[in-house]
Image (cartoon, rainbow, N blue to C red):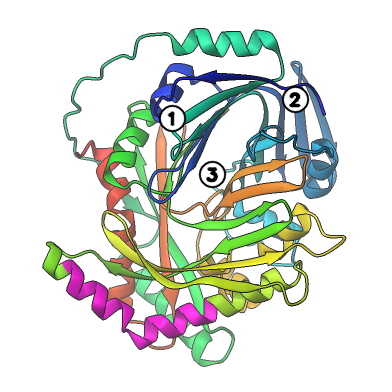
């Protein structure tokens, strides 16, 4: 393993540090609600991008192009190494996003939806410099592959923080890729598939488009205030920016332990404390919600079972209630031990994309999604996170996320369709999931 220079700094909120350090091709992973660790990744020594079989690897200003399986090439590019004692989980390796459509390298699926955004399937940077924040211990460290890099980061953190003027709320038009009538028709078609036995639940989505005229990082700063989340992220990449307040974890692999935390079930928050408690009680006693969540637990256990040691799977938190700014969810935590001969890429293949954002059974349901949704998902319902040479990784699910390209913003939100789903209620739920993002774009709070 290359030498890593480590320096301690006084604790500073990650979003403030990122505001001082941000530069093209940089990443902020910020844990707020129920999270402990945050990371900033800067100054890439290598950039890995793929679209289908077309791969670009840029290093020292030179771009190499090739045609091959991107997962195989990423495994090769990442290499292998051991994480030294005392280093954080992300100390080296690749960080960025893996888009939904990479699933075509895991399963044979149709590809008919229009890919109008034309974004990379995979966009990962290999940073020279990493900042690590422990919110529990209130400590922060800089990790750099060079002493010069360490000194540069320290100097940039000494800059004064610029105060922002209060943002005037503006009117923004959000246009869906569905009319209401067309969305109702999509829900009804999914119900027919469920009743015919093709699927138990189908997670379809609609995508809102809007104009984004300001710095997307200002939108992120508002979003983190409006809707603190455990898997928040800001990715400033070449040609695309991701602004995320995801509440959902796809998978984590650390020292051979594999963990997933599926979300299944959504209810609106109450207008006051009393109404919120009543809604939570109703939510947690809703047999339909519990039944659907149990189905998702079984799906995730089955996926984990493909890569974990026999008998090692356990549910260590069952159907817990988590509250966010506009919504509440039911979550479950599932753990296992990685089986001999398996690595993080085997885990990725088994778990990706998360069953909570496709439905069950996965493959047939993804075929239906491709038929019903008018546009390719791109990064949406893929994953943001990192993979390291020490065979460890941590990935979220890209939901509650604004994607910005060429001054246009895209917010995609969905819900699970079952046999008795009400089209009006399903349609309204997508808006409830988008409200925090709408508010952040408009300049609320």
**Of residues 264 and 133, the one drawn nearer to the viewer in this rendering:** 133
- Range of residues picked out in magenta: 276-296
- Residue on which disc 1 sits: 14
- Residue on which disc 2 sits: 58
Judge whether residue 173 can be spotted in this image: no
The quarter holding residue 82 reads: top right
Q: In the image, residue 208 lies at what x, y percent?
A: 37, 51
Q: In the image, residue 131 lies at what x, y percent?
A: 55, 26
**Of residues 186 and 395, the one drawn nearer to the viewer in this rendering:** 395
Which numbered disc covers residue 117? 3
SS of the residue under disc 2: strand
SS of the residue under disc 1: helix
Q: Nearer the viewer, mark 2 or mark 3?
A: 2
The stretch drawn in magenta includes residue 140: no
Vertical side of 274 occupied by 51: above or below: above
Q: Which is more N-terminal, label 3 or label 1?
A: 1
Magenta span: helix, strand or loop, mainly? Answer: helix
Q: Which is more N-terminal, label 1 or label 2?
A: 1
């Amino acid at each position: 393993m290359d030498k890593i220079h480590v320096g301690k700094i006084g604790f500073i909120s990650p979003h403030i540090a990122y505001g001082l350090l941000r530069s093209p091709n940089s990443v902020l992973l910020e844990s707020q609600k129920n999270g402990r660790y945050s990371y900033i990744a800067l100054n890439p020594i290598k950039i890995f991008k793929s679209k289908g079989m077309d791969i670009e690897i840029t290093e020292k200003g030179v771009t190499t192009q090739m045609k091959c399986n991107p997962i195989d090439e990423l495994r090769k590019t990442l290499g292998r190494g051991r994480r030294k004692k005392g280093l954080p989980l992300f100390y080296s390796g690749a960080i960025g996003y893996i888009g939904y459509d990479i699933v075509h390298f895991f399963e044979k699926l149709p590809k008919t939806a229009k890919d109008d955004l034309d974004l990379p399937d995979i966009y990962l940077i290999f940073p020279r410099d990493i900042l690590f924040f422990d919110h529990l211990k209130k400590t922060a460290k800089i990790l750099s592959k060079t002493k010069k890099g360490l000194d540069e980061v320290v100097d940039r953190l000494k800059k004064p923080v610029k105060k922002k003027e209060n943002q005037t709320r503006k009117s923004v038009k959000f246009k869906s890729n569905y009319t209401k009538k067309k969305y109702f028709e999509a829900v009804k078609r999914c119900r027919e598939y469920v009743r015919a036995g093709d699927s138990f639940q189908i997670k379809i989505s609609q995508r809102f488009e809007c104009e984004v005229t300001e710095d997307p990082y200002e939108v992120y700063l508002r979003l983190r205030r409006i809707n603190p989340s455990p898997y928040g992220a800001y990715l400033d990449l070449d040609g695309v920016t991701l602004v995320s307040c995801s509440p959902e974890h796809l998978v984590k692999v650390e020292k051979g332990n594999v963990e997933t935390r599926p979300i299944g079930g959504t209810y609106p928050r109450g207008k006051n404390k009393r109404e919120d408690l009543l809604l939570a009680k109703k939510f947690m006693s809703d047999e339909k919600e519990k039944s659907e969540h149990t189905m998702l637990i079984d799906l995730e256990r089955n996926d984990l079972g493909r890569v974990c040691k026999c008998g090692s799977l356990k549910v260590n938190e069952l159907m817990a209630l988590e509250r966010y700014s506009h919504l509440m969810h039911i979550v479950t935590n599932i753990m296992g031990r990685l089986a001999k001969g398996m690595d993080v890429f085997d885990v990725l293949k088994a778990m990706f994309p998360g069953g909570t954002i496709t439905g069950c059974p996965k493959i047939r349901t993804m075929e239906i999604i491709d038929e019903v949704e008018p546009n390719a998902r791109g990064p949406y319902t893929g994953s943001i996170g990192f993979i390291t040479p020490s065979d460890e990784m941590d990935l979220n699910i890209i939901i509650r996320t604004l994607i910005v390209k060429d001054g246009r913003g895209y917010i995609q939100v969905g819900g699970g369709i079952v046999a008795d789903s009400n089209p009006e209620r399903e349609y309204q739920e997508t808006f409830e999931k988008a409200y925090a993002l709408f508010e952040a774009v408009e300049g609320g709070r």
